[in-house]
């Protein structure tokens, strides 16, 4: 019976001495730093846009062309940037976009393609494309002719003013031409 009481007393002393008195006079940040948890609590991760985004455009032109564009965000493909602000590390994940286009002439499908940054890789260095996202895609009504339709797209580096714009010309036979354009006018 004495041995049982002795074991009980030892367990009682062991459990009452582990009450965290050593941490009483330390800040939460010190305790989290000691256990390597501060970084995970001070990180803020944002996805831009937060949710899946999709824009569908169906355009009929007077030259018998019909353009269907489905522009959407890619959930598992993004460009990241890190910003530090007041003890917190903010990680922004900018989702990449792509567009599925279908061009019809006189109600006959002449081309169906997916437009994303990978098909423009010959126009710019790989470093730009690793950081760029598709910003816009639109039908250029003014540049379209009786035998072709123009679609413009813009790729930008997040958090900068650096953008590259391209014109995609599709003729009535489905032939596609891509050229870089400069939409910003230089004034002197």
Image: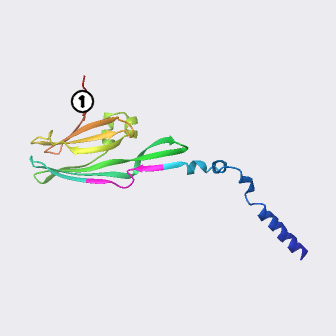
Structure colour scheme:
rainbow
The quarter of the image holding the N terminus is bottom right
- At 51% across and 41% down in the image, what residue appears? 84
Residue 149 horizontal/vertical position (percent): 15, 43
Residue 4 is left or right of residue 51, and the answer is right
Q: Is residue 52 magenta?
A: yes
Read off the magenta span.
Answer: 45-55
Residue 170 is left or right of residue 127, and the answer is left
| Quadrant of residue 12 within the rendered picture | bottom right
- At 36% across and 47% down in the image, what residue appears? 96
- At 74% across and 60% down in the image, what residue appears? 19
- At 37% across and 55% down in the image, what residue appears? 51
Residue 152 horizontal/vertical position (percent): 23, 41
The quarter of the image holding the C terminus is top left
Asked which secondary structure carries label 1, the reply is: loop
**Total numbered labels placed on residues in the image:** 1
Above or below for 24 versus 135: below
Local packing at callout 1 (Cα closer than 10 Å; few below 14, some 14-19, many 20+) is: few
Front one among 176 and 30? 30
Residue 73 horizontal/vertical position (percent): 34, 51
Front one among 130 and 9? 9
Q: Is residue 62 magenta?
A: no
Above or below for 179 versus 43: above
| Quadrant of residue 169 within the rendered picture | top left
Residue 23 horizontal/vertical position (percent): 71, 53
Residue ID for mark 1:
185
Identify the residue at the far bottom of this view.
Answer: 1
Identify the residue at the far front of this view.
Answer: 25
Identify the residue at the far right of this view.
Answer: 2
Front one among 114 and 33? 33
Residue 128 is left or right of residue 10, and the answer is left
């Amino acid at each position: 019976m004495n041995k049982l009481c002795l074991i009980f007393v030892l367990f009682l002393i062991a459990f009452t001495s582990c009450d965290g008195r050593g941490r009483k006079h330390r800040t939460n940040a010190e305790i989290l730093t000691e256990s390597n948890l501060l970084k995970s609590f001070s990180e803020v991760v944002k996805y831009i846009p937060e949710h899946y985004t999709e824009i569908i455009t169906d355009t009929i032109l007077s030259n018998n062309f019909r353009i269907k564009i489905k522009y959407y965000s890619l959930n598992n493909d993004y460009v990241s940037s890190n910003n530090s602000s007041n003890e917190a590390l903010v990680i922004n994940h900018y989702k990449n976009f792509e567009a599925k286009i279908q061009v019809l002439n006189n109600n006959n499908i002449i081309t169906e393609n997916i437009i994303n940054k990978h098909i423009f890789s010959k126009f710019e260095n790989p470093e730009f494309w690793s950081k760029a996202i598709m910003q816009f895609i639109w039908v250029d009504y003014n540049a379209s002719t009786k035998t072709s339709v123009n679609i413009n797209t813009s790729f930008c580096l997040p958090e900068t003013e650096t953008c590259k714009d391209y014109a995609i010309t599709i003729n009535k036979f489905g032939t596609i031409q891509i050229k870089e354009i400069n939409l910003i006018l230089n004034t002197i």
